[in-house]
Image (cartoon, rainbow, N blue to C red):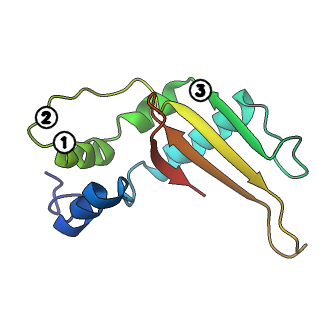
């Protein structure tokens, strides 16, 4: 259990059961998330700024930051809460990444990159904008 109590509340676990996903706040340390983003942009050949050659990119990214992210203690504790009593094991990576690269109509707003992690079964497991 997290030192400040469980990661997920009862209502968050209920949401997961009902809709199939839940947002885990601060699941991955921000420094690791930044390393994952940089590595994903490099390995998936995503330019740092628009225009992007494709609106969607997909791929598996390999590297130590992705291993750290997939096995971050807060994330693993949330998974443990969701699978309480079930056998499960940690993952070596975050699986398939799907990146949506969107241009903003306004020059004032920055372009947006949204990344989803997809399990081998095709289920969306998390997202980061």
Q: Position of residue 106 (x, y in %)?
A: 88, 75
Residue at 36 percent of width and 26 percent of height: 91
Q: Within 10 Å of the Cα at label 2, are there few (<14), some (14-19), or many (20+) other Cα atoms?
A: few
Q: Please tell me whether mark 3 sits on a helix, a strand or a loop.
A: strand
Q: Earlier in the sequence, mark 1 or mark 3?
A: 3
Frontmost of labels 1 and 3 is: 1
Query: Mark 2 = which residue?
Result: 86
Q: Position of residue 111 (x, y in %)?
A: 79, 61
Query: Mark 1 = which residue?
Result: 83
Q: Is residue 2 visible?
A: yes
Q: Position of residue 116 (x, y in %)?
A: 56, 46
In the image, residue 115 above or below residue 38? below
Along the line of sight, which residue is nearer the eye, 2 or 10? 10
Residue 60 is labelled as 3
Residue at 29 percent of width and 63 percent of height: 15
Q: Please tell me whether mark 1 sits on a helix, a strand or a loop.
A: loop
In the image, residue 17 above or below residue 83? below
Along the line of sight, which residue is nearer the eye, 92 or 65? 92
Residue 3 is labelled as none
Frontmost of labels 2 and 3 is: 2
Q: Please tell me whether mark 2 sits on a helix, a strand or a loop.
A: loop
In the image, residue 127 above or below residue 53? below
Residue at 59 percent of width and 26 percent of height: 60
Q: Are marks 2 and 3 in contact (CB under 8 Å)?
A: no
Residue farthest toward the front in the current orientation of the protein = 18
Q: Earlier in the sequence, mark 2 or mark 3?
A: 3
Q: Within 10 Å of the Cα at label 3, are there few (<14), some (14-19), or many (20+) other Cα atoms?
A: some
Residue farthest toward the left in the current orientation of the protein = 85
């Amino acid at each position: 259990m997290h030192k400040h109590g469980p990661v997920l509340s009862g209502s968050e676990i209920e949401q997961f059961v009902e809709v199939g996903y839940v947002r885990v706040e601060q699941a991955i340390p921000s420094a690791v998330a930044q390393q994952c983003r940089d590595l994903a942009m490099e390995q998936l050949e995503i330019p740092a700024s628009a225009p992007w050659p494709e609106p969607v990119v997909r791929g598996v990214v390999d590297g130590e930051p992705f291993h750290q992210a997939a096995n971050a203690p807060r994330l693993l504790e949330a998974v443990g809460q969701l699978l309480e009593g079930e056998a499960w094991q940690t993952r070596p990576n975050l699986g398939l990444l799907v990146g949506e690269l969107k241009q903003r109509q306004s020059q004032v707003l920055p372009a947006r990159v949204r990344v989803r992690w997809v399990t081998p079964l095709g289920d969306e497991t998390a997202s980061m904008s």
